[in-house]
């Protein structure tokens, strides 16, 4: 296939950038030229795939606020801030691609507005990617998040963003009703999870969404961590890239829970607390501000996680049972699905204690039925095709 120019859009957050890295890496490996619209925060990771970065200035995000604060008026303000970020991305893209237009636009559905705008104005195909559960006219994730549905209805966010989108289209010279723009069908929709994990998968027609599973690319073979010489089974504990006001307390509970137990504990502290703030750690516990998660999961017996979709998919890929400790509505929906498919257990954040954590990890680590289910789920996840299948599907659109 000849080299094509592909424009990529993703929301500027780790959980949205990471799912695309393996796909872009594979597209570049196949000879395509990729330009990724993003912020300086993610430039280094994006450039490592071989893509060029089209930079714009990011706005205030969930990571800046802390998940405990996201309610009511604050949620409205964040939604409007995210829309303002979409406007900034659109302006950067139009300036860059005016003289060097792409042949295709690939986008995370969270930033539909600037990506679809470019696709419509240039008359080039677009591919939509769902970084979490896929949705369509017959299934909405709000079914699994009633508190969010209620907040949206009471806050008027949908109406506010609809008016913003109408103005956005007018400002950028697109004469199209908001409803038509938003519901426009793309020639390809990708979801980075296996179909077995999708809610209401029977409501998706064949080919409507291609479930390619996690697209790890070179991250599947990442190094940067060595298993302990003790030979103890490994439990990885991480709350991901977002900030939680009680995250430090949770990690201290983990230290108390596993001190002296026959587990080797790897704490990824992220934005929650600096490792040194945890004090002197027992010999069987290590803490890092960040480490390549897949390098640990390859050796892990159990994963204690906030259940972001990316982390959950990595666990399924490596066949690691999960102790789900969700803190926000979408994570809670993922955690519920983990329990439904038999991949782990869930502990509500207001029920977490050192004893509960230790008991859950010990039970999962020795439960052969869970291990057997994870072996099946791991095979289904890997067989979904990952980055290679995603690239195949994108190339099919390019040659149509």
Image (tube, rainbow, N blue to C red):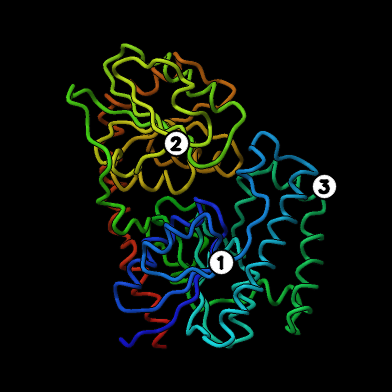
Q: Earlier in the sequence, mark 1 or mark 3?
A: 1
Q: Are marks 2 and 3 in contact (CB under 8 Å)?
A: no
Q: Under tag 3, what secondary structure?
A: helix
Q: Is residue 41 above or below residue 397?
A: above
Residue at x-position 40% and y-position 22%? 360
Quarter of the image where the N terminus is located: bottom left
Secondary structure beneath dot 2 equals helix
Disc 1 to disc 2: CB gap under 8 Å? no
Label 2 or label 3, whichever lies nearer to me, is 3
Q: Label 1, on which residue?
A: 55
- Within the image, what quadrant is residue 294 found in? top left
Q: Which numbered mark, 1 or 2, is in the foreground of this view?
A: 1
Q: Earlier in the sequence, mark 2 or mark 3?
A: 3
SS at circle 1 = strand
Image quadrant where one finds the C terminus: bottom left
The crowding category of the residue bearing disc 1, from other C-alpha atoms within 10 Å (few below 14, some 14 to 19, many at least 20), is some
Q: Is residue 306 above or below residue 400?
A: above
Residue 366 numbered tag: none
Residue drawn 59% across and 75% down? 93
Above or below for 148 versus 257:
below
Ranked by sequence position, the earlier of labels 1 and 2 is: 1
Image position, residue 29 (x, y; %): 29, 72
Q: CA distance from mark 1 to mark 2?
A: 40 Å
Look at the numbered discs 1 and 3 and tell me whether their residues touch, using CB distance below 8 Å.
no
Q: Position of residue 329 (x, y in %)?
A: 61, 41
Q: Position of residue 355 (x, y in %)?
A: 44, 13
The residue carrying mark 3 is 154
* Residue 350 located left or right of residue 384: right
| Horizontal relation, residue 114 to residue 384: left or right | right
Q: Position of residue 175 (x, y in %)?
A: 76, 85
As drawn, is 194 to the left or to the right of 244? left
Quadrant hosting residue 163: bottom right
């Amino acid at each position: 296939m000849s080299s094509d120019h592909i424009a990529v859009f993703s929301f500027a957050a780790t959980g949205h950038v990471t799912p695309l890295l393996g796909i872009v890496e594979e597209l570049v490996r196949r000879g395509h030229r990729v330009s990724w619209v993003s912020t300086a925060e993610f430039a280094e990771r994006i450039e490592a795939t071989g893509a060029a970065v089209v930079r714009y200035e990011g706005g205030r995000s969930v990571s800046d606020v802390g998940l405990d604060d996201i309610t009511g008026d604050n949620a409205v303000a964040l939604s409007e801030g995210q829309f303002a970020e979409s406007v900034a991305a659109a302006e950067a893209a139009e300036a860059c691609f005016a003289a060097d237009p792409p042949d295709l636009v690939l986008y995370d559905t969270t930033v539909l507005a600037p990506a679809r705008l470019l696709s419509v104005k240039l008359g080039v195909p677009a591919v939509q990617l769902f970084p979490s559960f896929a949705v369509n006219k017959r299934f909405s994730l709000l079914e699994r998040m009633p508190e969010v549905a209620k907040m949206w209805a009471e806050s008027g966010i949908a109406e506010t963003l609809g008016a913003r989108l109408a103005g956005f289209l007018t400002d950028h010279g697109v004469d199209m009703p908001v409803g038509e723009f938003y519901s426009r069908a793309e020639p390809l929709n990708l979801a980075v999870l296996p179909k077995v994990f999708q809610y209401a998968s029977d409501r998706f027609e064949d080919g409507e969404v291609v479930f390619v599973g996690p697209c790890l690319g070179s991250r599947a073979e990442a190094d940067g961590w060595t298993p302990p010489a003790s030979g103890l089974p490994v439990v990885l504990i991480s709350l991901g890239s977002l900030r939680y006001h009680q995250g430090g307390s949770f990690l201290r509970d983990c230290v108390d829970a596993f001190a002296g137990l026959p587990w080797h504990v790897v704490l990824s502290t992220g934005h929650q607390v600096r490792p040194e703030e945890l004090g002197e750690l027992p010999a069987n516990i290590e803490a890092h501000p960040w480490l390549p998660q897949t390098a640990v999961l390859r050796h892990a017996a159990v994963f204690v996680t906030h259940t972001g979709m990316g982390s959950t998919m990595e666990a399924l890929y490596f066949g690691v049972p999960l102790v789900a400790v969700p803190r926000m509505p979408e994570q809670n929906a993922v955690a519920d699905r983990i329990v439904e498919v038999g991949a782990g257990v869930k502990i509500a954040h207001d029920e977490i204690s050192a004893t509960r954590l230790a008991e859950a990890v010990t039970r999962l680590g020795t439960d052969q039925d869970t291990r057997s289910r994870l072996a099946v789920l791991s095979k289904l996840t890997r067989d979904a095709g990952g980055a290679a299948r995603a690239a195949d599907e994108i190339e099919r659109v390019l040659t149509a």
